[in-house]
Amino acid sequence: MTNLMVDARDLHKSYGAVPVLKGIDLQIAPGTVTCLIGPSGSGKSTLLRCVNHLEKITAGRLYVDGDLIGYRERNGVLYEISEKEAARQRAGIGMVFQQFNLFPHRTVLENIIEAPIHVAGITPREAKARAHRLLEQVGLADKAGSYPNQLSGGQQQRVAIARAVAMEPKLMLFDEPTSALDPELVGEVLRVMKQLAEDGMTMLVVTHEMGFAREVADTVVFMDGGVVVESGEPATVIENPQHPRTQEFLSSLL
């Protein structure tokens, strides 16, 4: 268990009587990129949100870096941990959403240094130095004093990535980070994500960008109807899918 960054075992999630995840098994090694693909409503985003306990699982076990997420287990029974403990677990897991979720009344710099100072407890000076380094990495060194409404969607999403990375997470989750962007802005966000992957960040990415999945992913997981239908290397799953449902889905995209 300790040599896996993510270890999901027979994961179930229901909303009332409606099952959304129906027994997911997923193992992710440190330093690898896993892309979740599949139709809308297949459970991809729900799975992602379970990984940092934004959604509570109904059954199963989910570990990140060896820690049971969201619960404590005693005698085979799960007990939910406090919100404070969940927030502490979440601090080590960065997440980038479809919408950028930046604080509109704060500058780019202020958005990035907020959590490192108030959650991680680093000094303002160190947080600012880290933020400036990250802004340079994402190509926005000149935007530290700008407000979100002065930036394009692609720039805002790159700030959101820098903000997540500023917490120095061990795992990054991306929930369709380019879906809200105009097509010409998608490339600049994917470039930043590719650089993160090259730097060894462990990433779990929900995406419809097959080119990115083909080029960057170590593993591609095709989900449909709340189950993993097929998974493997991109060359297998994307280029030569074995399952008829995967073939059907990809033929509508490629």
Image (cartoon, grey):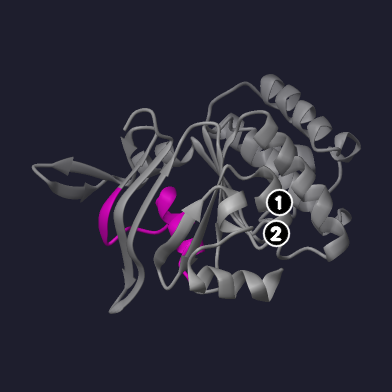
Q: Is residue 66 left or right of residue 137?
A: left
Q: Amino acid at mark 2?
A: Glu
Q: Amino acid at mark 1?
A: Phe
Residue 18, position in %: x, y? 33, 78
Give the residue pinned by disc 2.
Answer: 209
Q: Secondary structure at mark 2?
A: loop
Q: Secondary structure at mark 1?
A: helix
Residue 203, position in %: x, y? 57, 42
Please indicate, yes or no, whether residue 107 appears anywhere in the rendered image: no
Query: Would you place residue 27 above or below residue 127 in this image?
Result: below
Taking the view exactly as shown, the residue that stands out farthest to the left is: 75
The quadrant of the rendering that contains the N terminus is top left
The quadrant of the rendering that contains the C terminus is bottom right
Give the CA separation, mark 2 to mark 1: 5 Å
* Closer to us: 194 or 175: 194
Q: Is residue 121 left or right of residue 66?
A: right
What span is colored magenta in the figure? Answer: 42-61
Marks 2,1: beta carbons within 8 A: yes
